[in-house]
Amino acid sequence: MTSDTLQIRMGVVAARGLAAADKTGFSDPYAVIRINGKKYTTKVVKQTLDPEWNFEFDINLHPGRLPSLIAITVWDKDTFGRDFLGEVSVPFKNVFDRNAGGSADGVARHYNDPENQMAWYTLNKRTEKSNVSGEVCLRFGFIEKAMRPCEEYMKAWDELIL
């Protein structure tokens, strides 16, 4: 496994329990993901507090130039502008921490490994007045044609983040 060809796939799967931003009692939520100066945006899911985005993209990894943080912001789409629904930041070195069901018991895995679980992250407020509730569901994993043993991903990950 050569470190110059490594990719991690990030999945912004869903959100649940979002705050209602519209008069209808719902929101039209979408998420914006910022990583290493790049911006990715999910589709808008209309009239829901529990959107399913199933949005995936790949992050190329270069030793010595790893992202420090992944920032996810959830917005409510309005005809004119948008409303803030919450945000969460995940330190890049911790992307695998929650993929085994706990808060810090995860290991580096292939994205499609059946053992690679999704993880829920609580959305945070920007100010005390922010109307924020709910969580966003994320998934991370190495992406290659063939799935390797977990130990090989752990070794590669340890080498990358040191």
Image (cartoon, helix red, strand yellow):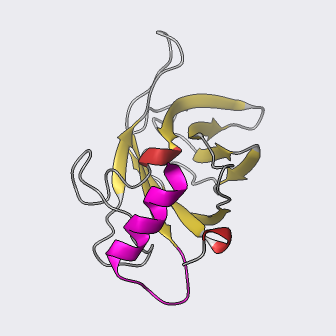
Q: Residue at x 42, y 38 (%)?
A: 18
Horizontal arrangement in the rendering, residue 71 relative to residue 128 (left or right): right
Query: Of all residues shown, which one is farthest toward the top?
Result: 128
Would you identify the image quadrant in which residue 99 lies?
bottom left
Location of residue 97 with respect to 139 vertically, above or below: above
Horizontal arrangement in the rendering, residue 60 relative to residue 123 (left or right): right
Q: Residue at x 75, y 38 (%)?
A: 79
Would you identify the image quadrant in which residue 110 lies?
bottom left
Magenta part of the chain: 143-162
Q: Quadrant of the N terminus?
A: bottom right
Location of residue 82 with respect to 77 vertically, above or below: above
* Magenta span main SS: helix
Would you identify the image quadrant in which residue 116 lies?
bottom left
Indicate the position of residue 100 as horizontal and vertical percent values. 25, 60
Foreground pick, 109 / 131: 109
The magenta stretch spans residue 161: yes
Q: Residue at x 60, y 37 (%)?
A: 75
Horizontal arrangement in the rendering, residue 104 relative to residue 36 (left or right): left
Location of residue 53 with respect to 15 vertically, above or below: below
The magenta stretch spans residue 19: no
Foreground pick, 19 / 32: 32
Indicate the position of residue 6 as horizontal and vertical percent values. 61, 70
Indicate the position of residue 23 as horizontal and vertical percent values. 53, 30
Foreground pick, 52 / 58: 58
